[in-house]
Amino acid sequence: MARKPIPMMALAALALTTTLAIAPAADAQGRTRQATVTGANGRTAASQRTVAHQDGVKTRTGSVQTGNGYGATRSSQNGYDETTGQRYRTGSTTTNSGQTVSHDTAASCANGTCNRSQTVTGPNGETASHDASRTIDENGNYVKSGTTTAANGDTYGRDVTRDGQGTKTTTTTDANGETNSRTRWVSVEPN
C-alpha cells in the first residue's frame, strides 16, 4: 500500500512546533522563531512566530505561507484584567483569501465558582458561544454546567454532577428543550 504524502501545511506546522518546543524561553521581552520546510516534491512552506510580553500581557503573532500562495496569519493576546478579575484571551486568524475568524475567551473564579465564556465569530459575522461554570454545590458535589449557542441561535446544554463516591450524572438539553439524563457508577473492588 502506497503511503500518502504529508500536506505542506502540516509539515510547516510541525516544523514551527518543533522549533518552538526546543527554543529557550530566556528572553522575557520577546522572541521570534522562523522555519522553512521543503518537501521531496520541491514545494516549500515558511512559518514565523513572534511572542512578546509587556505589562503582563502576552502577544503572539504568526504566519504560515506556502510557495503556492496559500497560508494564514494569526494573532492573539492574553493576560489578566485587574479591574474585572478575569483572565482573557482574544485573537484572530486570517487566510490569504481574506477570510477571518476571531475568538474571545474570559475566565474568572469568585465565591467558590469558576466561570468561562468563549465566543467565536466566523468570516461572515456569524457567532457561536459557549459558557461554562464549575462549582461545589451545597451537598459537596462537583457540578459543571455548560451552554452552547450555535450560529443559528440554537442552544444546547450539558450539566455534569459528580458526587466524589463514583457516581457521575450527565444531563443534556437539545435545541428543542428536551433533556436526556444518564447516570454512571464506578466502583473499585479491592484485590
Image (cartoon, rainbow, N blue to C red):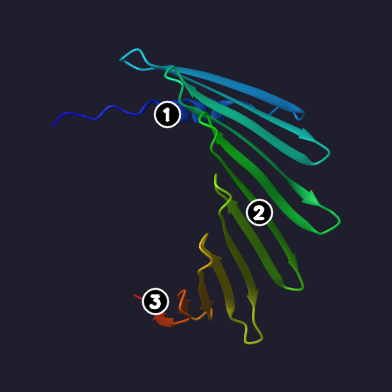
- Quadrant holding the C terminus: bottom left
Q: Which residue lies furthest to the left in this view?
A: 1
User: The disc labelled 2 sits on which kind of residue?
Assistant: Thr
Does residue 166 appear in the picture of this structure?
no
Q: Which of marks 3 and 1 is nearer the N terminus?
A: 1
**Circle 3 — which element?**
loop
**Circle 2 — which element?**
strand
Residue for point 62% across, 82% down:
140
- Relative placement, left or right, of 182 versus 134 is left
User: The disc labelled 1 sits on which kind of residue?
Assistant: Met
Residue 80 screen position, x and y as percent = 78, 50
Closest to the camera, between mark 2 and mark 3, is: 2
How far apart are the alpha carbons under marks 1 and 2? Answer: 26 Å
User: The disc labelled 3 sits on which kind of residue?
Assistant: Val
Does residue 150 appear in the picture of this structure?
yes
- Relative placement, left or right, of 65 versus 6 is right
| Image vertical order of residue 128 relative to residue 103, above or below | below
| Image vertical order of residue 53 relative to residue 112, above or below | above
Q: Residue furthest top?
A: 42
In front of the other: 155 or 157: 155
Q: Callout 1: few (<14), some (14-19), or many (20+) C-alpha neighbours within 10 Å?
A: some
How far apart are the alpha carbons under marks 3 and 1? Answer: 46 Å
Which residue in the structure is indicated by mark 1?
A: 9
